[in-house]
Amino acid sequence: MITEIYLKKPDEPGYNELSIIEKEEFEILLSQIRMTLLTSTKSVLGESEFGVNEESNLFEFSDSIDLTSIEQTIKFQLKKYCTLLRNREYSVSVKTLADGIDQFKNSVHVLITVDKKATFVIAY
């Protein structure tokens, strides 16, 4: 049985204020993915490669962002650090999309599909 520290925030769906341990494998997988993608590179002591350095692209223009490099970095991170993805089929796709509010802003969207049915999107 897999267990992990409960990491959901109060504003997330399904939050339970009485939980301190997470036992649902899928929720633990989500936590692994989220932690890997939202941690900055070189911010974890003893594991300087852990995390995606998304801040390095923060002020890049959309036509100069190397989406292939970002996608490869994310695939490497997930393969190395998300242990619950090892026995699952998953894909990663990175796209730039218009902001929708500000015509001069774009955002980078990362789509991760697990087992061909669950798709997670994170935007930088």
Image (cartoon, rainbow, N blue to C red):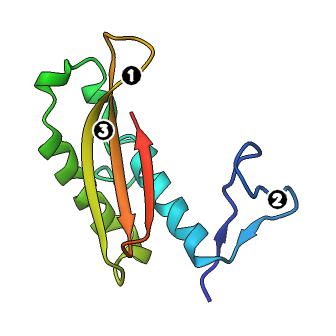
Q: Residue 65 location in percent, x, y?
A: 16, 29
What amino acid type should be assigned to the residue bearing mark 1?
Asp
Q: Which mark is residue 16?
A: 2
Question: Who's the residue at 36% across and 72% down the image?
Answer: 116
Contact between marks 2 and 3 (CB within 8 A): the answer is no
Residue 52, image x, y percentages: 32, 45
Q: Is residue 44 visible?
A: no
What is the quadrant of the C terminus in the image? top left
Amino acid at pointer 2: Asn
Q: Is residue 6 above or below residue 42?
A: below
* The label number, if any, that marks residue 53 in the structure image: 3
Name which residue type carries label 3.
Answer: Asn
Judged left or right of residue 31, residue 82 is left
Instruction: Identify the element where label 1 is drawn.
Output: loop
The quadrant of the image that shows the N terminus is: bottom right
Residue nearer the viewer, 20 or 33: 33
Q: Nearer the viewer, mark 3 or mark 1?
A: 1
What is the C-alpha distance between the residues marked 2 and 1? 32 Å
Q: Considering only vertical position in the picture, is 1 above or below 112?
A: below
Mark 2 and mark 3: Cα distance apart in space: 31 Å
Identify which residue is drawn at 77% across, 45% down.
10
- Is residue 102 visible in this depiction of the protein? yes
Determine crowd level at label 3: few under 14, some 14-19, many 20+ residues with C-alpha closer than 10 A.
some
Circle nearer the N terminus (2, 1) = 2
Dot 2 lies on which element? loop
Residue 70 percent location from the top left of the image: 21, 44
Most foreground residue, 66 or 6: 66
Residue occupied by mark 1: 99
Question: Gap in Å between the C-alphas at discs 3 and 1?
Answer: 21 Å
State which mark lies toward you, 2 or 3.
2
- Sequence-wise, the earlier of marks 3 and 1 is 3
